[in-house]
Image (cartoon, rainbow, N blue to C red):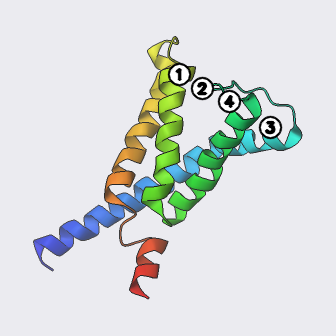
Amino acid sequence: MSISNTNTSNLSIALLILRVGAGALMLAHGIPKLQMLFSGDIQFPGVMGLSPTISLALAVFSEVICSALILIGFKTRLASIPLIITMLIAVFMIHAADPFARQELGLLYLLLYIPLFLLGSGKYSLDAVMQKK
């Protein structure tokens, strides 16, 4: 195995770990929001002039649907865009006046989604399986 193949395999393993970890952990944030949306008892801030319901629906879309897509490695680059936007809004709008400790988790997620946007899902993903066909 050449150095190039080893590096490619290591990169794909790292992307797999990053995708599964980020996707699963964000689902833990998104599923309670999905339950809130379906219950109708919406306790969520409106953002950028949008109603709390629309803001919550957009957060649910990114944190549940896009996280699930990233988890399986399907349309990873595209799915990371709403999550990047959601984390930017969470850090710089929702938690802008809060101490760094409240912003830290959003920044950490943001730092996970940017490499996924730049690098894609890697060879251990549904994207890679579909490209082979």
Percent x, y for residue 61?
A: 65, 48
Between 88 and 109, which is closer to the camera in this rendering?
A: 88
Residue picked out by circle 1? 93
Q: Residue at x 63, y 55 (%)?
A: 65
**Closer to us: mark 3 or mark 2?**
2
Please tell me which of labels 3 and 4 falls first in the chain. Answer: 3
Please tell me which of labels 3 and 2 falls first in the chain. Answer: 3
Q: Are marks 4 and 1 in contact (CB under 8 Å)?
A: no
Q: Are marks 2 and 4 in contact (CB under 8 Å)?
A: yes
Between 52 and 33, which is closer to the camera in this rendering?
A: 52
Please tell me which of labels 4 and 1 falls first in the chain. Answer: 4
Mark-to-mark CA distance, 4 and 1: 13 Å
Q: Are marks 2 and 1 in contact (CB under 8 Å)?
A: yes
Q: Which mark is residue 48?
A: 2
Task: Describe residue 78's horizontal placement relative to residue 66 as left or right.
Answer: left
Residue picked out by circle 3? 36
Q: Residue at x 40, y 44 (%)?
A: 112
Task: Describe residue 46's horizontal placement relative to residue 74 as left or right.
Answer: right
Q: Residues within 10 Å of mark 4 (few under 14, many from 20)?
A: few
Residue picked out by circle 4? 50
